[in-house]
Amino acid sequence: MAARKKPPILTLTPEQESDANRKIQRFMADRFELDLGSFEAAEVLELFTREIAPHYYNRAIFDVQAQLKERFESIESDLWALEKN
């Protein structure tokens, strides 16, 4: 029985997907002299979308959380400064 593929963490518009496929094809041809068809490039993109993109997504979430924490601490400090005794 084949393993179920996990759903992608992100999806691209058809235009973005087409652009990404062309970039993969160009990169593989330029760097490795490997001519990929559109099907093969789509498979590479799917691999990155399912297996690698989640790492970048999670890192982005972590970075945003850190930025928001810093921002909220700054706002809290500003509010304490406004407190009247």
Image (tube, grey):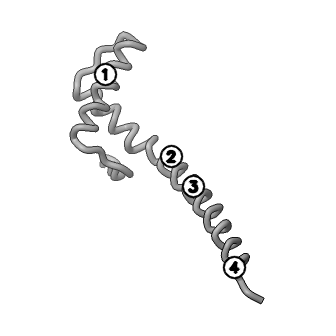
Q: Give residue 84's quadrant in the image.
A: bottom right
Q: Residues within 10 Å of mark 1 (few under 14, many from 20)?
A: many
Q: Nearer the viewer, residue 42 or 74?
A: 74
Residue placed under numbered mark 3 in the picture: 62
Direction from residue 57 to residue 66 in the image, left or right: right
For marks 3 and 4, the one nearer the N-term is: 3
Q: Which mark is residue 82?
A: 4
Q: Residues within 10 Å of mark 2 (few under 14, many from 20)?
A: few
Residue 40: horizontal and vertical position, in percent?
A: 27, 27
Residue placed under numbered mark 2 in the picture: 55
Residue placed under numbered mark 1 in the picture: 25
Q: CA distance from mark 1 to mark 2?
A: 23 Å
Is the Cβ of the residue at disc 2 closer than 8 Å to that at disc 4?
A: no
Q: How many marks?
A: 4
Residue drawn at x 27%, y 32% is: 42
Is the Cβ of the residue at disc 2 closer than 8 Å to that at disc 3?
A: no
As helix, strand or loop, the secondary structure at mark 1 comes to helix
- Give the amino acid type for the residue marked by disc 1 in the picture: Gln
